[in-house]
Image (cartoon, rainbow, N blue to C red):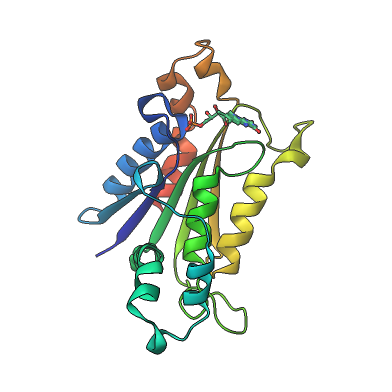
Amino acid sequence: MTNLLVVETSPRGDFSVSRAMTRHFVEEWRAAHPGGEVVERDLARTDLAFVTAPWLHAYFTPPEQHSPDMKQALRLSDELVAELLAADHVVIATPVYNYNVPAALKAWIDHIVRKGMTLGFEGQGLVTGKKATVLLASGGIYTAGSPIRDRDVATVYLRLILNVIGIADVTVVAGGGAKVVDMQEESMGDFVAKLRPTIKQAAGGPM
Ligand SMILES: Cc1cc2nc3c(=O)[nH]c(=O)nc-3n(C[C@H](O)[C@H](O)[C@H](O)COP(=O)(O)O)c2cc1C
């Protein structure tokens, strides 16, 4: 059975453009993968901690020496890593905040990049044989030809970190110019409908 992991980031619920992109993606993915399983990890509803000293202590202690407190410190990280490793395809839906990913998504990344689990001790990515799709909503437009293309840090960063953990097949669907939806110059439906062919292509490929 194929497994899709959906990582949602936006705190804006029904007003979120990236979440609307996800709904289209999941619809297309289900159509292309009948019987596939969809697992959702909603970072707006996950009690994500930033990296702390006890967390780091546990991280750098061999698992066979973990105390109950260390196990507890890594519990959420273990759970997030297990979700990622179980997936055939991971879709990350996210806003751009201050040219980069929101803090919640960065925190998720800090939890899933784990030596010996997703990253080898020689620095080789261990999350191989999977695809990733990034559904990015941004007020500005950063695609080729944009005068602010050099500010597209979120795309560069997400591609980089996914590549580092071993996911080479990364597709980015750029929902740029999403401020027209907030300014009510265009409906959410019309805005996302224009992205549908790209979303369908990202969702429909063979596993
Ligand atoms: C705190 C904050 C910072 C933002 N920073 C940027 C930015 O640097 N560049 C940009 O293009 N849009 C920026 N935006 C606009 C959002 O990316 C845009 O509203 C997007 O649709 C949010 O995603 P969502 O609709 O899924 O919540 C920012 C929005 C907020 C609330």
Front-most of residues 182 and 28: 182
x, y percent for residue 189: 40, 21
Residue drawn at 40 percent across, 68 percent down: 73
Where is residue 111 drawn, in percent x and y?
A: 47, 62
Q: Is residue 190 among what the camera can see?
A: yes
Residue placed at 27% from the left, 45% from the top? 31
Residue found 58% across the figure and 37% down from its top = 96
Work out which residue is located at the far left of the displayed protein and give it.
Answer: 35
Q: In the displayed structure, does residue 61 sit left or right of residue 98? A: left
Compared to 37, does 72 lie above or below? below
Q: Residue furthest top?
A: 185
Q: Which quarter of the figure is the C terminus placed in?
A: bottom left
> Which quadrant would residue 101 be assigned to in this image?
top right
Residue in view at x 30 percent, y 40 percent: 27
Q: In the drawing, does residue 180 fall left or right of residue 127?
A: right
* Quarter of the rendering occupied by the N terminus: bottom left
Is residue 207 shown to the viewer in this render? no
Question: Residue at the bottom extreme?
Answer: 64
Left-right relation of 108 to 72: right
Q: Quadrant of residue 151?
A: top right
Ligand 1's image quarter is top right
Give above or below for 29 relative to 115.
Answer: above
Q: Please state the horizontal and vertical placement of residue 159, each as a whole percent of the image.
A: 61, 56
Residue 95 in the image, given as x and y percentages of width and height: 53, 36
